[in-house]
Image (cartoon, helix red, strand yellow):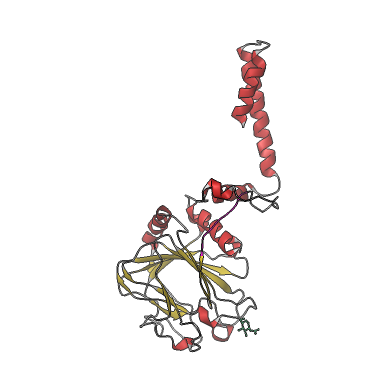
Amino acid sequence: MRGKACKENWRFYKKPNLGFPALILSCSFFFIAGLFASNLLLSQGTSSDERWLRARARQLQSVEEEIISKYDLLPSGESGDDFITLIPFQVLSWRPRALYYPGFITAEQCQHIINMAKPSLQPSTLALRKGETAETTKGIRTSSGMFVFSSEDQAGVLQVIEEKIARATMIPSTHGEAFNVLRYEIGQKYDAHYDAFNPAEYGPQTSQRVATFLLYLSNFEEGGETTFPIENDENFEGYDAQKCNGLRVKPHQGDAILFYSIFPNNTIDPASLHASCHVIKGEKWVATKWIRDQVQV
Ligand SMILES: *[C@@H]1O[C@H](CO)[C@@H](O)[C@H](O)[C@H]1NC(C)=O
């Protein structure tokens, strides 16, 4: 825009033939005026952070311009977008409410997260119920993992992904926990469990996990599926993780799965019980984003 102002000016000042110094002067004037105007614009309404994120979210649009141009845009509110977001998904199940997002992130973004996580992996831990100890729950979750906040990613990749997750779930990114990056090596698994915390088992909760967004960072050759119990099977707790039966999904690198642990009436969905089957061949990497009912500080 600033460049354009100077160009137009070029023509305008050429006629009176005021010479080079006038040209420099006028360009400098418009440059400074442009700088001032853009600062004014940025300080108006939303923060520059939000603007940056929206600009990045727009870059994420992998959809052809021609598809987007088929739609008429409406005026948006201050926090809204001035572009169309198309995120393809498949409904896997209504019980639990589970969705599949093929190609949600790129292979490069996957590799970036893996590289970031690798040096700080630790054996994964469990939230313990009353009476449970680390010893009695040994073997339930055998993966390694680490937590990373998007703000810790200098490259800004996690922030961009977080924004896309917020669009897919329509829950602001402020409701998300840090990313939990996990690696499952051969033989490693996670037995059937809930992501939500039942107060009857875990005691009173100050906030609850509403939904889980799972990013699949690697292709794994055999095993490692994510499973949910068979629909209409009421005996969820008797679910046999060894057999790994039920709704069994094996997404590819870059794909994502979203499922809700909480019904719209704020009770836990018994069908949101899920497991990660043993990896038989290859290495399974995932990044989990737990989304809560309250803003995380
Ligand atoms: C909440 O919603 C679920 C799913 O529709 C239903 O099965 C359950 O009975 C409801 N619970 C209460 C307490 O309303």
* Quarter occupied by residue 297: bottom right
Does the magenta stretch mainly form a helix, a strand or a loop?
A: loop
Residue sitting at 56 percent across and 62 percent down? 168
In the displayed structure, 74 sits above or below 214; it is above
Q: Position of residue 247 (x, y in %)?
A: 44, 77
* Quarter occupied by residue 284: bottom left
Q: Residue furthest front?
A: 70
In the displayed structure, 247 sits above or below 33; it is below
Residue 278 seen in the figure? yes
In the displayed structure, 79 sits above or below 138; it is above
Residue sitting at 55 percent across and 79 percent down? 197
Q: Is residue 286 left or right of residue 283?
A: right
Stretch of the chain drawn in magenta: 83-89
Q: Nearer the viewer, residue 113 or 296?
A: 113
Q: State which quarter of the image contains the N terminus.
A: top right
Q: Is residue 239 left or right of residue 290?
A: left
Residue sitting at 62 percent across and 24 percent down? 6
Q: Position of residue 34 (x, y in %)?
A: 66, 32
Q: Is residue 234 magenta?
A: no
Q: Position of residue 124 (x, y in %)?
A: 41, 72
Residue sitting at 62 percent across and 51 percent down? 71
In the displayed structure, 245 sits above or below 216; it is below
* Quarter occupied by residue 139: bottom left
Q: Is residue 87 magenta?
A: yes
